[in-house]
Amino acid sequence: MFNMRKSKICFMVPRNHEYLNYSLKDQKKILNEIEDLPQAVLESNVTSNAKRYYRMARAVSREIHYHKMFTRLKIEGNAVLSGTIQPEHEIEDIILKFFYHRFPKFIIILKSTRKKRNYFIAPKELKESVNKKEISVKIERDYIVGNTTINLETLLSIFLPLVESNLLFKEILDTDLDLNRLFKEFYDSQYIDSRENYTLFFQNMPKKYQKKKDMVVEKTFRTKTLDKFLNE
C-alpha cells in the first residue's frame, strides 16, 4: 500500500507548509527524527511519527503531481510560456524544472497566486540581463532559476525583448508560426466525435477538482463547460 521510499520522504517533508511554519529548531528536530527512524518503520507507517511524516510527504507529492498534470501554459512571443499555479507547499522550483525539461528552448514563468510571486526558469546566458535588484536569480547547471514580486506583465516586458535579440531563440522565433493555432489544429485533428463518453468524463473528474479556479481546460468537454453539463 505504501511505496514512498525514505529518501523521497526526506526530500518532500521540508517542502511541506506545515513543516515550514515550525521554528528552525523544530525543523531540525523533525529531520533528525526522520533520519533516526528505521526505513521499514517509516515506509510502513507503524508508528504515529511515521504516519505523520509520511502524510506530510504524501501531501507534497500529491500537489506536485496535480500541478504537473493540470497547469496550463500560455505562449507569449513564441518563446515564453507562462501559467498560474496555487501551491500550498514549497514546490515552485520542481514545477518549473518539470516544464523546462519538457520545453527546453522556452523560458517558463509561473505566477503563484497564494504567494503573490512570479517564478521563472531560463537559459543561464540571460542571467546578467535579468539580474536586477527586485529579482532574485541563481544559476543551476545550464539554466537560471529566479523569483520576484513584480507582476507578470512587467516580467514579460523584461524577457520578451531579450528573446527577440538572443540567438538562443532563433529557431522558434518564426513570425509566420502561430503556435496557438497549430495546437488547436492538432487537437481538432485528434478529436473523434464518435468517441464522446460523458459518463467516463465525469468519472475521471474528481469532485474536489471541479471547484478549483485553475481547472478551466479540464472543466471543458469539447465546447461546453462541466457546469453546463451538470445543470442539464
Image (cartoon, grey):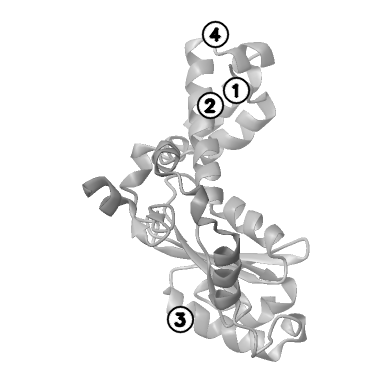
Q: Callout 2: 10 Å neighbours few (<14), some, many (20+)?
A: some
Nearer to us: label 1 or label 3: 3
Asked if residue 232 lies left or right of residue 20, the reply is left
Q: CA distance from mark 1 to mark 3?
A: 42 Å
Q: Residue at x 72, y 87 (%)?
A: 166
Compared to residue 47, the image places residue 230 above or below, namely below
Q: Which residue is mark 1?
A: 34
Residue 126 vertical position relative to residue 212 in the rendered view, above or below: below
Residue placed under numbered mark 4 in the picture: 46
Q: Looking at the picture, does residue 133 appear above or below residue 53?
A: below
**x and y percent of residue 88 in the render?**
42, 45
* Cα distance between the residues tagged 1 and 4: 13 Å
Residue 205 rendering spot, x and y as whole percentages: 41, 41
Question: Three-letter amino acid code at disc 4?
Answer: Val
The residue tagged with tag 1: helix, strand or loop? helix
Relative horizontal placement of residue 19, taking residue 127 as reference (left or right): left
Please state which of the two labelled residues, at mark 2 or mark 4, is closer to the viewer: 4
Q: Quadrant of the N terminus?
A: top right
Q: CA distance from mark 2 to mark 4?
A: 17 Å
N-terminal of the two: label 1 or label 3?
A: 1
| Label whose residue precedes the other's in the sequence (2 or 3) | 2
Q: Are marks 1 and 4 in contact (CB under 8 Å)?
A: no
The amino acid type of the residue labelled 2 equals Ile
Residue 30 numbered mark, or none: 2
Cα–Cα span, label 2 and label 1: 6 Å
Upstream in sequence: badge 2 or badge 4: 2
Residue 169, by quadrant, is bottom right
Secondary structure under the numbered disc 2 in the rendered image:
helix
Q: Determine the residue located farthest toward the left in the rendered image.
A: 231
Q: Amino acid at mark 3?
A: Thr
